[in-house]
Image (cartoon, coloured by chain):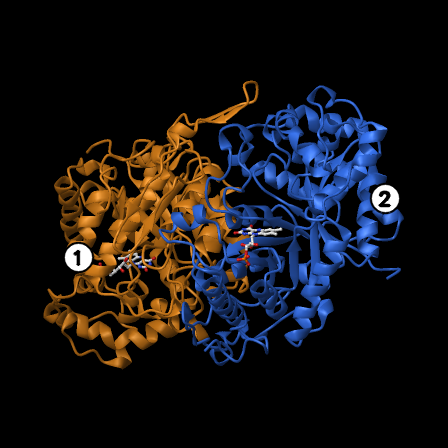
Chain colours: A blue, B orange
Amino acid sequence: MADKKMILGMTLNSGYGNISGAWRAPEVDPGNYANIESNIRYAQAAERGGFAFLFTPDFPTVRGDVEFSGIQNIMEPMMALAAISQATSNIGFIATGSTTFQEPFNTARQFKALDAMSHGRAGWNAVTTSDSMVSANYGRPVADRAERYQRANEAIQIVQALWGSWEKDAWIKDQASGRFLDASKLRPVNLQGEHVASRGPLPIPPSEQGQPIIFTSGGPSPHLLELAGRYASGFIAEVWTIEEARAQRQMVRDAAERAGRNPDEIKYIPGLMTTVAPTVRAGLDRRLALSGDVIEARLPHVGALLGLQLDPSRYDQPLTEAQLRAAHASPMDPRSGIVLKVAREGWSPRDILAHGVIDFHPTTVGPAEVHADHLQEWLEAGAADGFWLSPDIYEDGVDAFVDEVVPELRRRGIFPEEYVGSTLRENLGVPAQYGLDPRVAGGTS
Amino acid sequence: MADKKMILGMTLNSGYGNISGAWRAPEVDPGNYANIESNIRYAQAAERGGFAFLFTPDFPTVRGDVEFSGIQNIMEPMMALAAISQATSNIGFIATGSTTFQEPFNTARQFKALDAMSHGRAGWNAVTTSDSMVSANYGRPVADRAERYQRANEAIQIVQALWGSWEKDAWIKDQASGRFLDASKLRPVNLQGEHVASRGPLPIPPSEQGQPIIFTSGGPSPHLLELAGRYASGFIAEVWTIEEARAQRQMVRDAAERAGRNPDEIKYIPGLMTTVAPTVRAGLDRRLALSGDVIEARLPHVGALLGLQLDPSRYDQPLTEAQLRAAHASPMDPRSGIVLKVAREGWSPRDILAHGVIDFHPTTVGPAEVHADHLQEWLEAGAADGFWLSPDIYEDGVDAFVDEVVPELRRRGIFPEEYVGSTLRENLGVPAQYGLDPRVAGGTS
Ligand SMILES: Cc1cc2nc3c(=O)[nH]c(=O)nc-3n(C[C@H](O)[C@H](O)[C@H](O)COP(=O)(O)O)c2cc1C
Ligand SMILES: Cc1cc2nc3c(=O)[nH]c(=O)nc-3n(C[C@H](O)[C@H](O)[C@H](O)COP(=O)(O)O)c2cc1C
């Protein structure tokens, strides 16, 4: 454990950031959503900080309160990453792609093309896409979980088999002898599932890492765990506490063992939202300036999470001694323990919310040590192999993390001094893969 | 007619070229297929020459005699063009995408993302994909033409409706007032066809040209003509003679009129393969050096095309007077007239084939005037609105065309002196399109 180093990834989305109102920050160009140039800049900043990968979540629809809060999703992950691949040289790409709403041959081809174009830096976050707004865009209802995961298993097997359909030395390209490739080393796939099928081979040679890797993400349903155990090299998680994360990491590792794999082959990667600032107070103010209205609307929740009746006229004052004594964290909501902890530090209800305590991820606010402490604690508790970070505002939040937190992590010896290599597999510590994976060779039917 | 100017497009494929054996040319890196950098270089060369668009044909499979002749297809068109879009600023992109093997929502999204990323330079070559090797990669048999075109009509209507689903001024992005967009100006599509359906809207704003344009390509079946007449702004053709091209162009224009459109809204664009060289002899030698073996194997066809028995021992000598008198072009094969014309110029059977007379397109070989004469003759005969060019070898063939032929075309006043604008629609002379096309608004059912 002593010299275990963490993997860091960073989300990329709309070009603004991950707190509500990020698009309104004065340093942000509100046109960034349609300007790939902004995401290229953030990718380069993350690469400067030694991040192993960029992660693009993907919900292909117009979601949420876009009228005021802006858009959260990237325009289109594969096109964006193709562009970013040409402006970077070490950072990898974990792009979300749906097993339900994409043809496996197209998925295999685009990810392998990205892998070739980036010289071995591609990975696929394979998700079943259960959002009904998304499925309507494909003219279909949401299938039940069993059917979605049946198709997902078939799709991943086909995609991996297509990726492996050129043997390592199939591509001869010898100008002198005139032999371009050895067709006997291109293997058809011939997989026929219940939902999807493909013949192959895929017309793309192995990359510097052989082929892309598979990630998945979600809540730990038995279906998802089984899928992760079989195929995934990484598991993107959303958990609130160390206890939750340790338990979930163990479930994921157990699933890998049940599939006959070494549990160290699957990296468990929970999320963290970051606001880097000279002081905690300055960080809270940065968050309040943009998300103040959202926080205002949520103030009534603080009392509920602590089992208290709070007086709205005192939302800007710390809780009283009596309130703190009466407060208790609900065992049903993992976030309420964090609310209580922050309340005990003496923050007002408004500042408690500004700590991001009920946002989508755990949040760290303040100078480098605050972030480094959180990351180190989770790493050393066996709650994570790495983290996917969601900076509050990309425009300056990535540089701040890279310039302030990364050096602190390196001082503590828990983050690599430089890239291990130039492929995603090298930087994640996952072996290269050429040809068919033995787990896939059996076929889907 | 006097000041009609031609549109030029250029194919992009594997990174080698369009003659057999191009991958073996000494100036070519045989690894180019997997190195997007080569296609970026060729795209930049074409842009320097004022080309309006790059055209990526697409057959997603391993086709042909790849063992020796190399690969003809680009690795993946959309990913490649996303990368190229960031390294160019005026040239447009006509990417082939299948109406049969892609989900309309994914097609709409990726093309519109390319359109946004390139600031208004995207177009979709919508084809039904009738190749059985391709359909096997999607686990399906080739559907009959009626079904393929039914789905194509539905898919194009859905894609165009999705492209138009943001009104021009929907995206407010006003940081001061906090309004990101006017959700009342995002319209669901709600199209339900027999094969495909979508709700929408698409989460991508209009580009500098509003939305991408539609092209199509193929032989002029009634189904394809009807589709082209309804939706296409460009028709990519493969024809051998001026007569064929004039007749086909008229068919395409008539189809547009039947659909209630101005026939000038659809550009008819036949192909040409080019070998630019100081002399015709030098050009033939360049072609023989790489395609000599293919030409050797085809020599027996020359006699058949002329209705003659040719003596293999005289393949390197011009035809005799008696042979030329006896020779006649078959009315069944448009290429035989070209064979006869070249034979009468005094070339040997081997050199006749080196002229590319039975390749996929008409071919021009030699100095600038040869190419300019062909292009001018077709343009002025009403056989073309523009041309898609297939250079013999990309590595030096694009620069040669740009440096030698383009200035000659400009001297003759038949090619624009510079880009009309920075969007594809401007450079093709097609009006911008925002919101729903009235032809689409009716729905598919
Ligand atoms: C951290 C995290 C990231 C996710 N990213 C995506 C995503 O980008 N796209 C998506 O469709 N679903 C995403 N999901 C949703 C899951 O893939 C899955 O649909 C959800 O957990 C329900 O899955 P189930 O049917 O297994 O319960 C994500 C979930 C989590 C926890
Ligand atoms: C110049 C030209 C380019 C074409 N490009 C493609 C292509 O890139 N991909 C494809 O699947 N078909 C392509 N086609 C084939 C046509 O789209 C079509 O499948 C073929 O003409 C048969 O269509 P039909 O069913 O209308 O007869 C091309 C055809 C021509 C003439």
SS label for mark 1 = loop
Amino acid of disc 1: Ser
Say if labels 1 and 2 share a chain: no
Quarter of the image containing the N terminus of chain B? Answer: top left
Residue A305 or residue B233, whichever sits in front: A305
> Residue A341: x percent and y percent?
81, 39
Q: Residue at x 73, y 33 (%)?
A: A308
Residue topped by disc 2: A408
Residue B83 or residue B147, whichever sits in front: B147
Q: Is residue B4 left or right of residue B277?
A: left
> Residue B393: x percent and y percent?
44, 58
SS label for mark 2 = helix
Kindly check if marks 1 and 2 are in contact, taking CB atoms under 8 A apart as contact.
no
Q: Residue at x 68, y 46 (%)?
A: A333
> Residue B38: x percent and y percent?
52, 54
Q: In which quarter of the view is residue B318 placed?
A: bottom left
Distance CA(mark 1)–CA(mark 2): 68 Å
Q: In the image, which disc is placed on residue B221?
A: 1
Please rate how many residues cluster around mark 2, counting C-alpha atoms within 10 Å: few if below 14, some from 14 to 19, many from 20.
some
> Residue A430: x percent and y percent?
70, 66
Q: Residue at x 78, y 38 (%)?
A: A340
Q: Chain of mark 1?
A: B
Residue A400 or residue B305, whichever sits in front: A400
Queried on whether the Cβ of the residue with tag 1 lies below 8 angstroms from ligand 2, the answer reads yes
Q: Is residue A174 left or right of residue B140?
A: right
Vertical position of residue B259 compared to residue B13: above or below: above
Queried on whether the Cβ of the residue with tag 2 lies below 8 angstroms from ligand 1, the answer reads no
Residue B65 or residue A361, whichever sits in front: A361
